[in-house]
Amino acid sequence: MNRDPLDPGSLGSLHGPVPRHIAVIMDGNGRWAAARGLPRRAGHQEGMKAVREVIEGCAEAGVGILTLFAFSTDNWQRPEEEIHALMGLLRLYAGQEKEELREKGVEVRVLGDLSRLDEATLGSVRAIQRETRGGARMRLNLMVSYSGRADILGAVRAIAARVREGVLEVADIDGDAFASHLLTGSLPDPDLLIRTSGELRISNFMLWQFAYTEIYTTPVLWPDFTQADLREALVEYQRRERRFGRVPSS
Ligand code: FPP
């Protein structure tokens, strides 16, 4: 069959394994804006279009879980104006999209240290989670005020508390028990990490969960990322041989 790897219309007809879980570091919004002489918030705003494209594309391709790094704990150190713009976009997104996501069967969860969010943003987060609950087609995790190290520390504290209460034996702390205390809970680890804008870093994202994740990077800046770019990432993923530390299969 003659397939055009850049044909975005064929995301639903990819031959070969499709990742169950994709994580994305959406990088390059600031550079996209700077290249046009625009304020950084304009890059984030444009990045929302790519967010919609990728959610749509993943659902079409049959990806079960999509995890987007929307705001890291380090991002709290950005200028007040930019934080304000990003929180505004989160509220706007939650308000505008919850109906459509519910209809499409996308269940949204917002994961991170939500105690740092203002009341209005927290209200929007609760509403989108409530109204999309039970969506069975795809799970969308928006990682907000999230860092991998904080996630691991949170799990360690929760486990220590359960041991102290006498409900968990030290000998029973295995990989699955540990992972179940992370914010991603019982979800399978990401099969594929996509990072845009050409940076080669994990940036304190899902440090435990990425143990065997395939990493795909592209120079494309996040606001320019399209379903054709997503398809390219999926085609590249299908070329990889996943070995999980074992010898190649013959
Ligand atoms: C990184 O680009 C991107 C972010 C810190 C925010 C990502 C947010 C969005 C795409 C919009 C909000 C998303 C949702 C789902 C509500 P950068 O600013 O670090 O870019 P730079 O490295 O070029 O400066």
Image: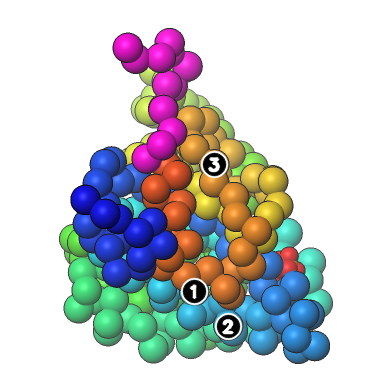
224 vs 54, nearest the viewer: 224
Label 3, secondary structure: give it: strand
Q: Is residue 84 above or below residue 216?
A: below
Can residue 72 be spotted in the picture?
A: no
Residue 146 lies left or right of residue 130; in this view the side is: right
Q: Quadrant of residue 126?
A: bottom left
Q: Residue at 42% x, 42% y: name it.
A: 237
| Residue 118: image location, x then y, percent | 59, 79
Q: Is-magenta flag for residue 247? A: yes
Q: Are marks 1 and 2 in contact (CB under 8 Å)?
A: yes
Mark 2, residues whose alpha carbon is within 10 Å: few (<14), some, or many (≥20)? some
Mark 3–mark 1 Cα distance, whole angstroms, equals: 19 Å
**Residue at 79% across, 80% down:** 34
- Residue 239 image point, x, y percent: 41, 37
Q: Give the amino acid at mark 3.
A: Ile
Residue at 36%, 65% in the rendered image: 7
Measured from the top left, where is residue 165 in percent x and y? 44, 30
Helix, strand or loop under label 2: helix
What segment carries the magenta color? 238-250
Q: Quadrant of the C terminus?
A: top left
Q: Residues within 10 Å of mark 3 (few under 14, many from 20)?
A: some
Disc ID at residue 46: 2
